[in-house]
Image (tube, rainbow, N blue to C red):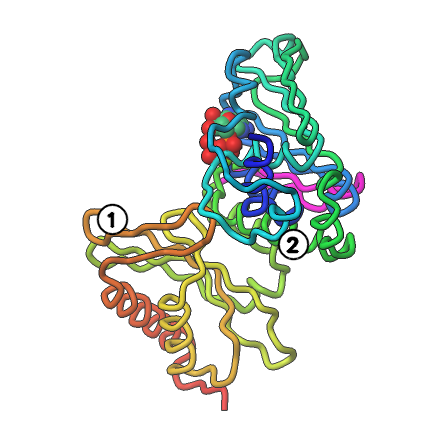
């Protein structure tokens, strides 16, 4: 069973950023209002995600780290060669199989309560012991891939790994303005983002995550047509320098990378005024599931719209209109 965990780990746990993504998703699922992410050495030494969500009850702690799937794959060598098997969920089991993992959680308001369980690589002996913790959960992942050298060797420099972590963090912080966020690396606080769904707090967060320049040249839009709503910000290109590759698209709160979406945005962008420029955007598509059947794959950021044509046309025409209104008569060439 531990090997099965490590196989699943191959899919879920590619690098520190994938650990952060999974742990933060769990924190969001637990209804947290505040999520703190802390790393050392790009996450290779330590990743800690702390939340104030529902917590995990004492009896459920070992279960949270266990999984039930079995596998016919026999050796570690085979395991390390497996790129992708259709495993889903069970992220904690997967992560704990390739790291030293500590889970401390408390379901009560009383901060003296709380329980702790640890797992280390394939030696999973989850014994639960008392550990004070405020209501919520802290997951600490140390020495990622300490027992899978091939994967560890795949890790890039601290800077590169942290860059991926920051990108994962950015996406998640942009997906939930109602949650407060913190990101620390090597004892240094890089982001401290207060919660708030009001325009001022939102735009502050955008500035903090994407740079002040993004907002100075961005157009805010919010359009709704028959069960489809598109809102967010589209960057207008500056003449001073090339824009960074900042493209964020969320469908019903989940970050998505999709050809159809990308195509619609690119077309609108080009069509109106910005020839040869990369569109930059932070956009939120909200679809009424009764109108558009949307299916977002939980780990792969893929989305499937039943009526793709309708979504494409809505995106294109909304953006086209908004951009045309923003810069009437002004063309880039
Ligand atoms: P999945 O999220 O697919 O259920 P995970 O391995 O990510 O699988 O988590 C296992 C379970 O542990 C979750 O279903 C949830 O019940 C619990 N859990 C994990 N992290 C948290 C958390 N931060 N707060 C509350 N419960 C959690
Ligand atoms: Mg999960």
**Residue 288: image tag:** 1
From the viewer's perspective, is 282 left or right of 34? left
> How far across and down, in percent of the image, does residue 229 sit?
30, 55
Foreground of the two, 163 or 154: 154
Q: On screen, 92 above or below 81?
A: above
Q: Which residue is pictured at 47% across the width and 28% down the height?
A: 68
Magenta residue check for 194: yes
Q: Residue 104, position in %: x, y?
A: 63, 20
Rendered view: 71 above or below 245: above
Magenta residue span: 181-196
Whether residue 204 is visible here, answered yes or no, is no
- Mark on residue 210? none
**Quadrant position of the N terminus in the picture:** top right
Q: Residue at x 73, y 38 (%)?
A: 147
Is residue 256 visible in the rendered structure shown here? yes
Residue 122 in percent (x, y) is at 66, 30
Q: Residue at x 57, y 49 (%)?
A: 205
Left or right of 150, for residue 261: left
Is 325 on the left-hand or right-hand side of 150?
Answer: left
For label 2, the residue is: 164
């Amino acid at each position: 069973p531990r090997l099965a965990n490590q196989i699943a780990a191959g899919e879920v746990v590619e690098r520190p950023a994938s650990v952060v993504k999974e742990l933060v998703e769990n924190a969001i699922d637990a209804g947290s209002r505040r999520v703190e992410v802390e790393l050392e050495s790009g996450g290779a030494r330590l990743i800690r995600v702390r939340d104030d969500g529902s917590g995990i009850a004492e009896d459920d702690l070992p279960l949270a780290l266990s999984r039930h799937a079995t596998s016919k794959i026999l050796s570690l060598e085979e395991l390390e060669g497996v790129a992708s098997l259709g495993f889903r969920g069970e992220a904690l089991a997967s992560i704990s199989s390739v790291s030293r993992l500590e889970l401390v959680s408390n379901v009560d308001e009383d901060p003296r309560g709380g329980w702790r369980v640890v797992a280390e690589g394939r030696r999973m002996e989850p014994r639960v012991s008392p550990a004070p913790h405020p209501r919520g959960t802290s997951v600490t992942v140390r020495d990622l891939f300490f027992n899978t050298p091939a994967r560890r060797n795949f890790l890039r420099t601290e800077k590169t790994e942290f860059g991926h972590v920051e990108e994962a963090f950015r996406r998640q912080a942009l997906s939930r303005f109602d949650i407060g966020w913190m990101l620390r690396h090597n004892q240094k606080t890089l982001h401290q983002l207060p919660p708030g769904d009001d325009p001022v707090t939102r735009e502050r967060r955008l500035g903090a995550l994407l740079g002040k320049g993004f907002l100075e040249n961005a157009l805010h839009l919010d359009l709704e047509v028959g069960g489809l709503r598109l809102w967010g910000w589209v960057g207008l290109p500056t003449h001073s320098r090339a824009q960074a590759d900042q493209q964020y698209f969320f469908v019903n709160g989940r970050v998505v990378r999709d050809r159809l979406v990308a195509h619609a945005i690119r077309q609108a962008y080009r069509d109106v005024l910005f020839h040869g420029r990369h569109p930059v955007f932070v956009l939120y598509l909200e679809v009424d599931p009764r109108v558009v059947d949307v299916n977002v794959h939980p780990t792969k950021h893929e989305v499937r719209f039943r009526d793709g044509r309708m979504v494409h046309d809505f995106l294109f025409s909304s953006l086209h209109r908004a951009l045309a209104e923003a810069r009437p008569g002004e063309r880039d060439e």
